[in-house]
Image (cartoon, rainbow, N blue to C red):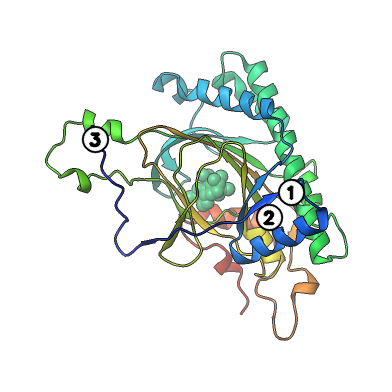
């Protein structure tokens, strides 16, 4: 079998960079400093020995696999993803598309049990897997946010984690399935292009930053995730099903007055095997007021963003395209 080598999309540079891996079983004060450094440098890091039980992850993954293996017509019954449910190829409401199908869920348990009827033939099992997964990733995200708060010496340790632990937190779960592409190349019978010109680098989920506070992502052993530390530069992230990948969202970027960066990233569907990922987007409650913490603002570092509620930010997010910068709209200087 001839497998074409992925070609970088023109004017893009693929760079191999060692991204930070943080072992959460190490000394707490060391770990917290490393996390701060990673949030400043990349807005992205990988955590190992994270304490999320393997069976919690496996149960969620099996439910997810079970759903995506269903016939297309059945999956459509769980859609459209407006704002929650099944979506295929269409992302958001403004014409963004990608080689991906997904389920978006609120982390609110009443909303999950209501949705599970259209998602699974065993809705109770599905809800229980999702609720177990959410509880575990919420704990992990809260721990990470507390570690950050400790190292930053913010006045209240729970200034970040309190927002995502709130019962009204607007957090989300996204289950993604990126179908294999090599299969298409051989099945569509299109031999008009030389192999290296086949679009085997198709965008699964286009370039964007995450709007929320923090994202925790777990994927299977199929790669595709890339982060962009600077314009036009892409750093591939090696898959690691035993780890969680963590990235800073726009809200944390704004609260730290830009000291932490909400990294731009994307996922390519460039493999001959399906990529599966599960993302937890830790968000504040809709009415929460987001403002730069005083300690990040000084004469030499003026306040970059005006205060906003998460509801306001979310509205702006959904009015724009996937790749647009929302933070720009809230910029003061
Ligand atoms: C990107 C991060 C999360 O996946 C998401 C996405 C959301 C959606 O798929 O509905 C958005 C996208 C994400 C940002 C811009 C808007 C909204 C699609 C889109 C074009 C669930 C989120 O919160 O923002």
Residue in view at x 36 percent, y 42 percent: 270
- The numbered dot on residue 185 is 3
Q: Earlier in the sequence, mark 2 or mark 3?
A: 3
Ligand 1 contact, mark 1 (Cβ < 8 Å): no
Residue 160 can be seen in this image? no
Quadrant housing residue 106:
top right
Where disc 1 sits, the SS reads: loop
Q: Residue 288 appears at what percent x and percent y?
A: 76, 55
Cβ–Cβ below 8 Å for labels 2 and 1? yes
Residue that numbered label 2 is attached to: 310
Residue that numbered label 1 is attached to: 285
Left of 76 or right of it: where is 25? right
The total of numbered circles placed on residues is 3
Extreme residue toward the bottom, this view: 299
Extreme residue toward the top, this view: 121
Looking at the picture, does residue 119 appear above or below residue 287?
A: above
Cβ–Cβ below 8 Å for labels 2 and 3? no
């Amino acid at each position: 079998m001839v497998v074409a080598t992925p070609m970088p999309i023109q004017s893009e540079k693929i760079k191999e960079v060692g991204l930070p891996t943080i072992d959460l079983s190490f000394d707490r004060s060391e770990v917290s400093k490393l996390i701060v450094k990673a949030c400043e440098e990349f807005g992205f890091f990988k955590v190992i020995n994270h304490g999320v039980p393997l069976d919690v992850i496996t149960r969620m993954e099996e439910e997810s696999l079970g759903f995506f293996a269903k016939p297309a017509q059945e999956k459509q019954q769980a859609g459209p993803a407006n704002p929650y449910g099944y979506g295929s190829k269409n992302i958001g409401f403004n014409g963004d598309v990608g080689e991906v199908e997904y389920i978006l869920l609120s982390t609110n348990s009443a909303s999950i049990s209501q949705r599970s009827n259209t998602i699974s033939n065993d809705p109770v099992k599905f809800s229980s897997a999702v609720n177990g997964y959410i509880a575990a990733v919420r704990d992990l995200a809260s721990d990470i946010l507390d570690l950050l708060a400790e190292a930053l010496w913010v006045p209240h340790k729970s200034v970040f984690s309190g927002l995502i632990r709130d019962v009204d937190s607007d957090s989300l779960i996204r289950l993604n399935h990126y179908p294999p592409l090599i299969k298409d190349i051989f099945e569509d019978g299109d031999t008009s292009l030389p192999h290296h010109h086949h679009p085997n680098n198709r965008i699964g989920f286009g370039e964007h930053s995450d709007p929320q506070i923090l994202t925790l992502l777990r994927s299977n052993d199929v790669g595709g995730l890339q982060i962009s530390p600077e314009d036009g530069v892409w750093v591939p992230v090696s898959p690691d099903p035993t780890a969680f990948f963590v990235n800073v969202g726009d809200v944390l970027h704004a609260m730290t007055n830009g000291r932490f960066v909400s990294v731009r990233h994307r996922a390519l569907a460039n493999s001959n095997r399906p990529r599966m990922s599960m993302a937890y987007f830790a968000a504040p409650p809709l009415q929460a007021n987001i403002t730069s913490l005083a300690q990040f603002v000084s004469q030499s570092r003026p306040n970059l963003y005006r205060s906003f509620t998460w509801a306001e930010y979310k509205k702006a997010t959904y009015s724009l395209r996937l790749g647009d910068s929302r933070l720009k709209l809230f910029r003061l200087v």
